[in-house]
Each structure stands twice: as C-alpha cells, then as structure tokens.
Image: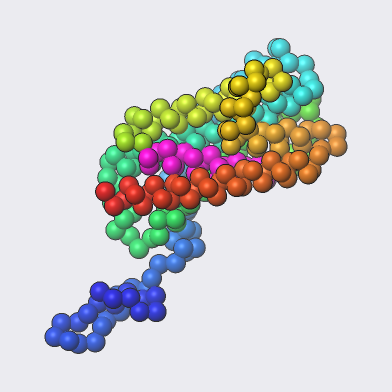
Amino acid sequence: MVRAQGVVRARAPHGGAAAPLAPRARLLPALSAVYRAQLSRARVARIPLLFVATFQSVGIMVLMRGVVDGGDEARAVVAGSSVLVVAFVALNLLAQYFGQLRASGGLDHYATLPVPPAAVVLGAAAAYASFTVPGTVVTAVVGSVLFKLPLAHLWVLAAVIPLAGAALSGLGAALGLLAPRPELATLCGQLGMSAALLLGVLPAAHLPVPVVWARDLLPSTYGVEALARSFDARPDWLLTAADLGVCAAVGVVSLAVATWAYRRAAVR
C-alpha cells in the first residue's frame, strides 16, 4: 500500500493503477468519535461511581463542618472536596480503565482502526473529565451552602473542571498505560486519589513543610487553589489565572506522555 495526498491506496495486481481504499483519518473527527463513544459508555457504567464520588465528597464536608467554622479553612475544604470528584473519576477510574484495556488486549482493537493515538487518549480523557461536571457542581454548591460561602464566583468551575480534569486524566491515562499489570494501575490510581484527598482537602497552613512541598507537586492542588480563591469577596484573578495556567501546562505534558505510552503499549 502507498499513501498519496492523504489517501491510502493499494497497488493493483499486474502493475495496474493504484486503487483508493479510504481517506486518511483526521485528528478532530476521530477525537469527536472516540469522545462520544467513551461518554456514552461512561453514562452506562460510571453513573453509580459518580454518585459514590459525590457522596464521598459531600460526606467529607459534613464531617469537616464539625471542626471548621469558616475562613480559609472552609474555603480549602469545599474547594478540595469539589476537585476530589474530578480526581476520583479522571485519575482513579481512568487509570483503571486503561490498565484493564491494556491487560485485556483492548488496545489491539484501537490499533486496527484508522484513529490517531492522540485521538484515543484525548477522547477518553475528555469523556471522563466531562463526566465529573455534575458531581463537582453539586459538591461545590452544597459545600458553599454548608459553610455559608458566596456562590457569586462559582462560574470559575467552568475553567477548573476542564483544566484540572485534563491534568488529572492525562496522569491517570499515563499510569494505566505504563503500569505493567492492571492491579498496579488500580493501586496507582487509588494512591493518586488518596493524595488528592489528603493534600487537597486539608488546609495547607496546618501541614508540615515537607508535605506542603509534596502538595505543590500534585496537579489538583492548583485547581483547588483557584476554586478556593473564588470564594473571596474580591478574588485575586491574576493568581487564579496563574493556578489555572499551571493546570493547563501539566495537562498538556501529561496527555503527551499518555499518548506516547499508548503508542508504546499498542505496538507490543
């Protein structure tokens, strides 16, 4: 077979003219197809888990309400619990999904399709990140009411969810594709979610310095900080944009690593 002007052609026998077989797959249409397929699958298989993630985050806020009255601590609890929903789905579940897909040979199915590797990774990551929207919004609203925080700037979630979701889903996909066994992918996803829980929900001022350094290495931290600032009477939008910029940068790098890991796993 030969390629000419983006069209796959097969050489005809006995020296005949090459016959076109199919147009070359483009990234955006392939990405859209994978996204729709993954989102449809997530609706069926992941709704109970989304309920668990939301119930878990709301439960944490209810427990913390007994020891936190307000101020910066309340903002940290609500923001951390909201982003925890994203971590549960985009990091934990996506790591498990790609780990199981690799172990079961499911990557072979995608490898036979005219779909660019980036479309598979980005489509799955976008679907899982989108799946977190209802639970994150519900958690943020319930937490704001519970701790009597202002709701005026919760529109920041429109930036926090996709950017934090990109960073965490890219990390989850990379963990799932690089783990040699699905059990290790599950373990890495659980550990990542636990880190998002412990380092995101607890106020940074109460953590030891080495733990604060570890917190700064976690991508979800910057989504938490951006959301926490939105509860101020006059949010510092420059710092909020900087935190979201970190999430975006980590998302680009982690998704690029996940795409490389997909290519590496698909050819084995």
Would residue 181 appear left or right of 28 to someone viewing this image?
left
Q: 209 or 156, which is in the foreground?
A: 209
Q: Residue at x 38, y 49 (%)?
A: 262
Q: Position of residue 86 (x, y in %)?
A: 56, 36
- Magenta stretch? 158-178
Q: Position of residue 152 (x, y in %)?
A: 80, 38
Would residue 116 appear left or right of 150 to someone viewing this image?
left
Residue at the extreme left: 14
Residue at the extreme right: 234
Q: Residue at x 69, y 17 (%)?
A: 206
| Whether residue 230 can be seen here | yes
Residue 195 within the segment the image draws in magenta: no
Q: Quadrant of the N terminus?
A: bottom left
Would residue 219 appear left or right of 236 to someone viewing this image?
left
Q: Position of residue 137 (x, y in %)?
A: 65, 37
Q: Is residue 7 above or below residue 255?
A: below
Q: 209 or 184, which is in the foreground?
A: 209
Q: Residue at x 32, y 36 (%)?
A: 180
Q: Quadrant of residue 113?
A: bottom left
Q: Quadrant of residue 236?
A: top right
Q: Is residue 177 above or below residue 7?
A: above
Q: How many marks?
A: 0
